[in-house]
Each structure stands twice: as C-alpha cells, then as structure tokens.
Image: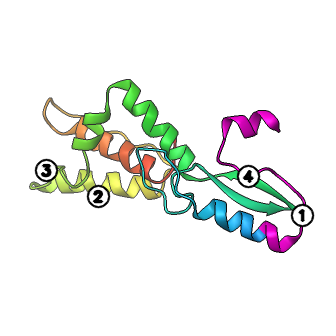
Amino acid sequence: MKAIQQCLPNVPSISSSTSGSLEIQIQRYNDEQGTLKGQNCQLCKNKGYIMILDEGYTALKPCDCQKKRETRGIVEKSGMKKLIQDYTFETYDSKAMWQRIIKEKALAFIHDQGHWFFIGGQVGAGKTHICTAIVNELMNLGNQ
C-alpha cells in the first residue's frame, strides 16, 4: 500500500475511521482537481481515479476516462493524431448519394458492432476517411 501512496502522492491514506470523516475524506479527494492532460473529465477531475467507500475503507477506483486516455496515447504515439483529428464524420464529404450511404452504414456499424464493416473502392473514394472516423468515434465511446 505504501508503494501506491508514493505513486499517487495526493491520495489520502487509507483508513477505517468513522463514516462521517470518511465521507468528508472521499468528498475532498473527489472534488480536488487533478493534473492529467489530454481530456477533461468531470467525474475524476483529471486525476484518473475516484475515491469510493468499500466495506468501511476508502479505496481508489480507476475512472472510465483512463481507457480513453490510454487509447488516445497510443494513437498519439502511432503518429496518427492529426489524421484522427481531421478525418471525422463531420468532415466527410457526403454530397453524392453513394457517399451518404457509406456514411449511414458507417454510423450504423458504430451502434451495431456485432457485424463487419467493409469498404472498397478506387483511390480518393474516402475509404481512409470513413474508417478513421469510425475508429475515432469508437474511441470516444471508450472502445480500445
């Protein structure tokens, strides 16, 4: 436990004191602003963890934003950060009917991931753009 405390210096020590003081301790920790960058999380306030009461003790629970932060970090290291930012559903050119159909199918795939998504076509058809938009949206939903 001491090793965890050293890695997370702003985490109050775990104790089993009265529930009133534990609730104050939990509230104080959860209200404190963290320093993590890359995403603004209202739940953990950019600390990556949320303090909870677990069988009379305080405990840290990883925030759901951790998965998103990890995935975004992988994208950044891969060199695809700019591509992910630029190739979105909003920027996909869907003037022609076939482009609108592709976009509709891609959006449907995001909400029904039990199936495959395949797109083929000539150079410049927007395959990379639409697939990158799918990946971006799946990451926003917390998928890795």
Sequence order check, earlier mark of 3 and 2: 3
Q: Position of residue 6 (x, y in %)?
A: 71, 35
Check contact, mark 3 vs mark 2: CB within 8 A: no
| Up/down of 56 relative to 141, above or below | below
Dot 1 falls on a residue whose secondary structure is loop
Name the residue type under label 3: Asp
Q: Earlier in the sequence, mark 4 or mark 3?
A: 4
The answer to whether marks 1 and 2 mark residues whose Cβ atoms lie closer than 8 Å is: no
Q: Earlier in the sequence, mark 2 or mark 4?
A: 4
Tell me the residue that label 3 is attached to. 93
Judge from the rendering whether residue 137 lies leftward or rightward of residue 4; answer left or right. Answer: left
- Residue 106: x and y in percent read 33, 51
Identified at 53% across, 51% down, the residue is 34
The verdict on residue 20 being magenta is yes
Residue placed under numbered mark 2 in the picture:
104
- Of helix, strand and loop, which one carries label 3? loop
Q: Which residue is mark 4?
A: 12
Say whether residue 29 is left or right of residue 33: right
Rounded to the nearest angstrom, the CA distance separating label 2 from label 4 is 49 Å
- On whether residue 97 falls in the magenta region, the answer is no
Give the labeled residue for mark 1: 17
Q: Earlier in the sequence, mark 1 or mark 2?
A: 1
Closer to us: mark 3 or mark 2?
3
Identity, as a three-letter code, of the amino acid under mark 1: Ser
